[in-house]
Amino acid sequence: MVETIGQVAQEAGDTDRIIEKHKGDKAALIQILLEIQRENRWLPRDVLMSVCKKLGVPISRAYRIATFYKAFSLTPQGRHQVSVCTGTACHVRGAPRLLDRVASALNINPGETSPDWRFTLETVNCVGCCALGPVIVVDGDYHGNPTPKEVERIIDSCD
């Protein structure tokens, strides 16, 4: 998250480095945005505008990409991404209860980020592990049918 002038300068330097890595190629816009997203955990408007200016592409193209693909966020995200699958198989196997447990443990609702920027909670339609349902995914690690104690352990294991 950008909070100080020093961080703004650092972020601008990181963006320039990423663009240079791709030789300023307009065709690499998605990859450039993915790398910026990975480093910042979101795509700030000023960064999008800077990238578009340097690549010579309209800002509308960057916004189309950023709003189409689930990998991008236009709002700040927590250090840990927590996803609860609410697909049909997970739903019938208890996803609503799991989501309630996770939201209660994190003290945030789906679509929110904790005030300390530690966690972002989201629901997803399917993670492709239907036989394990309900499933929680934390930073890319899949956990099938966790008990309430396991939910606490999973969350506590995040730095």
Image: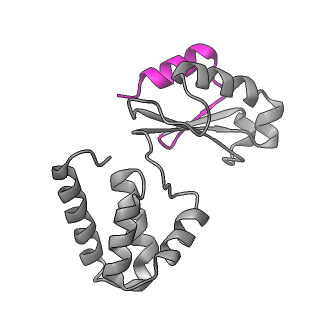
Viewer-nearest residue: 153 or 45: 45
Q: Residue at x 46, y 81 (%)?
A: 58
Specify the color scheme.
one colour
Along the horizontal axis of the image, is 132 left or right of 7? right
Q: Is residue 14 above or below residue 19?
A: above
Give yes or no for residue 149 being in the magenta stretch: yes
Q: Residue at x 52, y 24 (%)?
A: 106
Quarter the C terminus occupies: top left
Q: Nearer the viewer, residue 139 or 8?
A: 8
Counting from the top left corner in percent of width and height, residue 56 is at 37, 86
Q: Does 148 lie within the magenta span? A: yes
What segment carries the magenta color? 139-159
Q: Return the x and y of residue 29 as percentages of the image width and height.
A: 43, 76
Tell me if residue 92 comes above or below residue 70 in the rendering: above
Which residue occupies 52% across, 17% down?
152
* Foreground residue among 74 and 125: 74
Where residue 157 appears, as percent x and y from the top left, is 41, 24
Q: Is residue 29 left or right of residue 91?
A: left
**For the view shown, which residue lies furthest in the top direction?**
149
| Residue 110 rendering spot, x and y as whole percentages | 62, 35
Q: Residue drawn at (34%, 79%), measured in percent from left and top?
A: 53
39 shown above or below 67 = above
Number of dots carrying numbers: 0
| Residue 145, image quadrant | top right
